Amino acid sequence: MTRRKWLAAGAVLVFVGVIAFRLSHHKAKPPNPDDQPVPVSIATAQTQNVPIYLEALGTVQAYRTVTVQPMITGPLIAIQFHEGQHVDAGAPLAEIDPRPYQAALDQAEAKKAQDLANLANARSDLARYNLLVKQNYTSAQQAAAAHATVQEDQAIVAQDEAAIETAQTNLSYTKITAPISGRTGILQVNAGNIVTPSLASGIVVITTLHPISVLFSLPQQDLPQIQAAMQAGPVAVIAAAEGDPATAPVLDRGVLQVLDNQVNANTGTLTLKAKFPNPQSHLWPGAFVNIRLLARTDDQAITVPPVAVRQGPSGPYVYVLHPDDTVSAQPVTLGDTSETIAVIKQGLAAGTKIITQGGSRLKDGAKVKPVPSA
């Protein structure tokens, strides 16, 4: 073999060695990320009875409020309650010096006794004159005068009876009692002061806390729902503490009592009043509470977690999971939505598996891998 042939054979061997080396050290092509399954969380569309609430901010108001005013003038000699005490209707609260009014009653009764004696004498005279007229011993004019005297004395006695009733009423006003059952407030006047019916702040304010009322407002657009709920029966109302309505603790449950007879023209809202039993006194006059009025209940509604619903150019949709672990976008019609559930009116059947998390990386036909929710 010539030198040239040896050189050619050597070059071929070197070329083959280089190719073999490169093939042996060639790295595999990395997989395309788009071909990998997307990890997602899933949920199942369910049917349930969904209560539909109208929410508002309410102000607690005492069910009844009475300012206790003296009805007569006199020195206040006794206070018979403690501030903040619960009192029943008719319970004694205070007393005004009764002596002047007792004296007025005694005087009125004495005056009546005197006038009754005059009336008896006048009646006796009338009977005598009537007998004398029959016997022609006196004129009919004298008998008529005696009859007029009797009528005058009867009128005086009736006047005395009215005076006695007035005196008795004034005497009863010296004992001041609670006009309603409720909780007393701060005492406005102390014993020893002269009180009058024109006392500016009264003696004390009594408020009824059991039950108690809450005033709140709703947009006038809710009027049809409210009227329909009222026609169906008592409307349930929930009072909750301020904060997130979904997590705020419930303070009490009551019923709608009054729907105002007109819309506020300035705000376009309706004023409503609800009544609560308030057994634990969690509701206090002047406080603010969250109000949830049960407008209706959607029976056997299709519901999904709100996070599963997405918004697209054509409206809301959800990603539906198929048995081959692929997904497709399904347009839906939304109903009422809260923090925990979204009602699907059209476009989805109960039992359908949908994507809740990981949907931002999906498109129609994408491959997914279900994983537990975080």
Image (cartoon, helix red, strand yellow):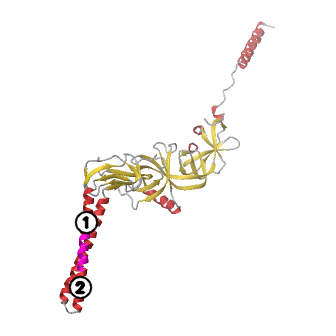
Residue nearest the observer in this picture, 216 or 101: 101
User: Extreme right residue here?
Assistant: 1
Answer above or below: position of 153 versus 69. Answer: below
Q: Which residues are magenta?
A: 112-122
Q: Is residue 80 left or right of residue 3?
A: left
Near mark 2 (Cα within 10 A), the count class, few <14, some 14-19 or many ≥20, is: few
Q: Is residue 257 left or right of residue 109?
A: right
Which image quarter is the N terminus in? top right
Compute the Cα span from label 1 to label 2: 30 Å
Question: Is residue 200 shown to the viewer in this render?
Answer: no
Q: Which of the two labelled residues, at mark 1 and mark 2, occupies the earlier sequence position?
A: 1
Near mark 1 (Cα within 10 A), the count class, few <14, some 14-19 or many ≥20, is: many
At label 2, the amino acid type is Arg
**Residue 12, horizontal then vertical, whole percent:** 75, 14
Residue corresponding to mark 1: 108
In the image, what residue occupies the spot 30% across and 56% down?
Answer: 174
Residue nearest the observer in this picture, 117 or 371: 117
**Residue 305, horizontal then vertical, whole percent:** 58, 44
**Residue 92, horizontal then vertical, whole percent:** 37, 53
Residue corresponding to mark 2: 128
Q: Nearer the viewer, mark 1 or mark 2?
A: 2
Which element type, helix, strand or loop, lies under badge 2?
helix
